[in-house]
């Protein structure tokens, strides 16, 4: 579904690689978590695989289509939800989704069916004909998700999808992610929320300073329970270690 | 002045002029350049003002000219005051920020009001004083007249300003009521714009007629009678003129002081009673949006992209003004300029230089219209990622944007040619040749502007996610366009006058063709790579 091989990405004015030799293979029907601290390279990787950023070397294939050599077919198989909830706010929710349905060439029958299904699932029926600028933060996120799903993508990519959402909205999105995978599609999402990731993901990759540190299968016994410890161990800096030791000393002294 | 008012006032100035640094040589040079430009503009205004008053003086209506001037300034300052007051006091984004801090709403009001008054005072002094000095020179006024100028200026700044404070709240309620009626706003703006250009050209036409023969009045006796009658009833604006020329001062001063007092008390009541309430209400209104019930509709990709672009532009008064309203005034301006040029030298040089003048005017307007394309990428703002993730080639997306700009410049140019032909200002072949040249240059300018924005977009949007102030791409696009207009126009005029219209036409067409080819080559060169590198 998604194959990333030896991905290297360096920004124009940067001296170091933001992503270095990243390799990933995502299978149909799995929910894949992408973990890392702020600035670890999660969003950069996502922006490379969605075609937003060019990259220095490596290959990214979506359903067998190379994002650089065959971008149109690669993009047709992918839906993307950004981390900043940006959507065309002058349009109404329906106009926005229809615009995306047009560019992803969704026929009328499918778009009507999916539109109604998602609008009701995300409880947006009352607002779809209002301008998006009147939407709340969560509503914008939901219309962005509907836009990303209107063409029923084989690969659904979400960048920090739960940021700033209330509990109910998070449950709705998680349910949709689960349902999407049941249809044989793949979900790839980045998050800081370890608890959430351990509950919903089949596998996770932890990235630190642009380098892939580990890929963990959460179906293997014990991995779910130890995910937080593993993450902390991997992502801790030298200073964190020193602080932890000092805390331990002071803790023992008390 | 309380500490808070001082701090807030400094904040306003810093927001507006923050880029200037007295210790920086570049800032000094920039300021010096601005001062030279302002001095040049004031000198220019003075010379125009002299012709204006001499023209009225010849008809025995120099006092009436002064009354008309003050009336125009009063109307202009009151209306622009309502607009700037609403924007600064009620709509500005920082209101929402300031309201979170322990700052009194009265202090916010006073600091913003002071900032507006200072700005208004500088602008009015710069525009009005050359006119008033020119009036003194034309009428050979005594020294006392010049001493009274500051009083007249102060009254004409403060009274319209205070009145505009009173009118701002009802004005704003009206704006809120029609803010989503985009078609209505665009039509009103177009009419106002065409009316403004029409009035401007009518005055300009009279001044040209006067310049041709300064011995005679350009006004018929009937017009003189009407203007004299009307000026008698232009209250309170005639009082501004009266205090200058010491006419009816026992009525003029009390009337102006009374009006000043009335508007001041009204403004204080607005601060105390309504400001905080309106501010809170307005922040809510800004987030409000319209509802439009439609059905899901399938469109071809190209049509869908162009439909989205249209909705983005026509649902913004700011964008539709830049995109559409100025274009609607273009045929009228071309007609007036040509008619004045032909009249200027019917038996002299008029006909020979018509090609150059028409090219100049059409290209100036085309530049302004196509400069909108210099923000084609920047306008996407945070939504730029859409253009990268959708399965539509970048070239096709950009072609959609190009089509939008092409469409409006094509229609505006075509209308200009229709007007020129209908009024028989030019032969058919000449009119269509001009159309071809202007269209080729409009395409070239659009491509240059789009490429500039692709190379370096500025995603700093404000308010409702729009570009409010022009960025450097727009300025450079306008600067380049004006330079091209001048080169084409002056070449057309000089060659037309010296060697005839045919050769002038060939040379201008050559320049247009050259620009067209260079623009296409520049635009297509590394287009995809440069687009993909945006934000990288």
Image (cartoon, grey):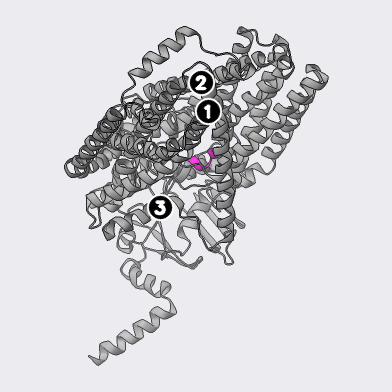
Query: What residue did someone put label 2 on?
Result: B57
Residue B13 is labelled as 3
Q: Label 3 neighbourhood size at 10 Å, few (<14), some (14-19), many (20+)?
A: few
In primary-sequence order, the first of circles 1 and 2 is 2
Magenta: predominant secondary structure element? helix
Residue placed most toward the observer, B120 or A254: B120
CA gap between label 1 and label 3 equals 38 Å
Label 3 is found on which chain of the structure?
B
Q: Is residue A251 above or below residue B328?
A: below
Tell me the SS state at disc 3: helix
Query: What residue did someone put label 1 on?
Result: B138
Contact, CB < 8 Å: mark 1 with mark 2? yes
CA gap between label 1 and label 2 equals 8 Å
Tell me the SS state at disc 1: helix
From the image, which quarter does the N terminus of chain B lie in?
A: bottom left
Q: Label 2 neighbourhood size at 10 Å, few (<14), some (14-19), many (20+)?
A: some
Let me know if residue A54 is in the magenta part: no
CA gap between label 2 and label 3 equals 42 Å
């Amino acid at each position: 579904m998604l194959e990333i091989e030896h991905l290297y990405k360096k920004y124009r004015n940067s001296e170091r690689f933001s992503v270095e030799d990243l390799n990933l293979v995502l299978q149909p029907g799995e929910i894949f978590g992408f973990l890392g601290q702020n600035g670890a390279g999660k969003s950069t990787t996502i922006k490379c695989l969605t075609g937003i950023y060019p990259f220095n070397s490596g290959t990214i294939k979506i359903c067998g289509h190379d994002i650089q050599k065959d971008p149109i077919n690669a993009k047709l198989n992918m839906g993307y939800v950004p981390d900043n909830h940006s959507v065309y706010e002058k349009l109404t929710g329906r106009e926005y989704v229809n615009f995306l349905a047009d560019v992803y060439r969704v026929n009328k029958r499918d778009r009507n069916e999916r539109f109604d299904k998602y609008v009701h699932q995300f409880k947006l029926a009352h607002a779809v004909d209002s301008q998006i600028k009147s939407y709340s933060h969560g509503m914008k996120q939901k219309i962005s998700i509907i836009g990303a799903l209107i063409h029923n993508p084989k690969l659904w990519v979400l960048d920090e999808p739960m940021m700033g959402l209330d509990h109910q909205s998070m449950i709705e999105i998680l349910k949709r992610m689960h349902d999407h995978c049941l249809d044989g599609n793949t979900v790839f999402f980045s998050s800081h929320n370890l608890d959430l990731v351990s509950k919903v993901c089949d596998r996770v990759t932890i990235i630190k300073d642009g380098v892939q540190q580990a890929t963990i299968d959460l179906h293997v016994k014990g991995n779910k329970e130890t995910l937080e410890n593993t993450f902390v161990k991997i992502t801790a800096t030298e200073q964190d270690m020193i602080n932890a030791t000092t805390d331990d000393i002071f803790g023992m002294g008390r | 002045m309380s500490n808070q008012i001082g701090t807030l006032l400094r904040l306003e100035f810093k927001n507006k002029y923050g880029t200037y640094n007295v210790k920086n040589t570049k800032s000094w040079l920039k300021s010096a350049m601005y001062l030279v430009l302002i001095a040049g503009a004031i000198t220019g205004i003075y010379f125009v003002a002299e012709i204006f008053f001499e023209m009225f003086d010849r008809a025995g209506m120099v006092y009436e000219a002064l009354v008309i001037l003050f009336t125009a300034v009063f109307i202009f300052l009151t209306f622009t005051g309502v607009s700037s007051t609403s924007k600064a006091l009620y709509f500005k984004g920082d209101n929402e920020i300031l309201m979170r801090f322990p700052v009194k709403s009265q202090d916010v009001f006073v600091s913003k009001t002071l900032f507006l008054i200072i700005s208004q005072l500088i602008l009015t002094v710069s525009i009005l004083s050359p006119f008033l000095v020119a009036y003194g020179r034309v009428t050979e006024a005594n020294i006392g007249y010049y001493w009274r100028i500051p009083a007249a200026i102060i009254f004409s700044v403060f009274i319209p300003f205070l009145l505009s404070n009173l009118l701002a709240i009802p004005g704003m309620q009206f704006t809120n009521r029609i803010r989503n009626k985009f078609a209505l706003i665009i039509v009103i703006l177009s009419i106002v714009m065409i009316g403004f250009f029409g009035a401007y050209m009518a005055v300009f036409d009279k001044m040209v007629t006067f310049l041709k023969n300064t011995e005679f009045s350009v006004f018929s006796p009937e017009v003189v009678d009407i203007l004299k009658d009307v000026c008698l009833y232009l209250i309170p604006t005639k009082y501004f003129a009266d205090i200058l020329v010491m006419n009816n001062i026992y009525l003029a001063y009390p009337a102006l002081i009374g009006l000043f007092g009335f508007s001041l008390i009204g403004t204080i009541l607005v601060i105390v009673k309504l400001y905080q309430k309106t501010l809170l209400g307005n922040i809510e209104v800004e987030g409000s949006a319209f509802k439009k019930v439609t059905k899901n509709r399938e469109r071809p990709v190209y049509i869908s992209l162009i439909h989205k672009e249209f909705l983005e532009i026509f649902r913004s008064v700011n964008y539709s003004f830049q995109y559409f309203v100025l274009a609607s005034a273009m045929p009228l301006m071309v007609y007036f300029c040509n008619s004045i040029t032909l009249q200027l030298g019917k038996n002299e040089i008029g006909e020979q230089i018509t090609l150059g003048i028409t090219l100049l005017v059409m290209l100036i307007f085309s530049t302004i219209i196509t400069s909108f394309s210099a923000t084609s990428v920047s306008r996407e703002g945070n939504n730029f990622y859409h253009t990268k993730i959708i399965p539509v080639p970048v070239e096709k997306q950009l072609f959609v944007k190009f089509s939008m700009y092409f469409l409006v410049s094509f229609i505006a140019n075509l209308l200009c040619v229709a007007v020129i032909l209908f009024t028989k200002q030019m032969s058919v072949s000449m009119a269509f040749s001009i159309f071809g040249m202007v269209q080729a240059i409009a395409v070239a300018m659009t491509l240059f502007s789009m490429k500039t924005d692709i190379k370096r977009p500025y995603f700093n949007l404000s308010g409702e996610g729009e570009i409010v102030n022009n960025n450097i791409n727009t300025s450079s696009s306008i600067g380049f366009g004006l330079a091209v207009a001048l080169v084409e126009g002056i070449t057309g005029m000089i060659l037309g006058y010296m060697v005839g219209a045919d050769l002038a036409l060939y040379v201008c067409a050559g320049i247009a063709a050259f620009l067209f080819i260079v623009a296409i080559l520049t635009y297509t060169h590394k287009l995809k790579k440069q687009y993909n590198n945006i934000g990288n």
